[in-house]
Image: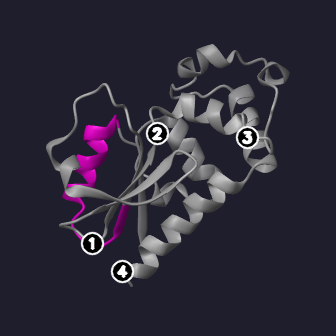
Amino acid sequence: MVILYPECYTEKFLCEYIGYSKNNIVKCNGKPDVIGKIKSSGNHDISIGIVDEDPMTAKHPDYKSYEQAETFLGMRLLKNRNSPNHFLIEFSDEFEPWIININRNKKAKIDFERFNIKKERLHEYTGINLPDNYKKFLKALFKKFPDPIDKINEWIAACGAANS
């Protein structure tokens, strides 16, 4: 069984958007909580954290046990050297700048204002009740440019397949 550990509500929405049920999603409160919950999950299930890089914040001590396996469009798949069923999918920098960079791709180019969103205020759309306009924006972006979602699904499938 694959269990996803999103760092915040935006990443939780992303997990739901790509098709995972609430039974397979354990929402966490920041990267240290994600890494801690993955560590305490043991090795029975495939545990995958969905996190921001957050380069300016302190790292959980166990973060150093993860090594880069692959990169794609500002995302990294990290594998835990000590626990073969533990992984992180990490967005470069933070999720909001990553979304802005993805939207710059010539295949994407969704107008933020069409959804009544100010891109310089994306970080405000992170609470428990993500605004519908933000969800609609993300859905439109990933419908027009599905490559990042396809890669996340590929990584999740590969994590499970490699440990079956």
On residue 84, the disc is: 1
Dot 1 or dot 2, earlier in sequence:
1
Q: Are marks 4 and 3 in contact (CB under 8 Å)?
A: no
- In depth, the one of 138 and 111 nearer the eye is 111
Residue 49: image tag: none
Horizontal and vertical percent for residue 153? 58, 63
Task: Compare marks 1 and 4 and give the one earlier in the sequence.
Answer: 1
Labels 3 and 2: the sequence-earlier one: 2
Q: What range is drawn magenta here?
A: 29-47
Of mark 4 and mark 2, the one earlier in the sequence is 2
Q: Name the residue carrying label 3.
A: 105
- Which disc is residue 92 wearing? 2
Instruction: Give the distance between the C-alpha atoms of the residues marked 1 and 2, in whole angstroms.
Output: 23 Å
Q: Quadrant of residue 116?
A: top right
| Residue depicted at x 63% and y 34% | 101
Marks 4 and 2 close (CB-CB < 8 Å): no
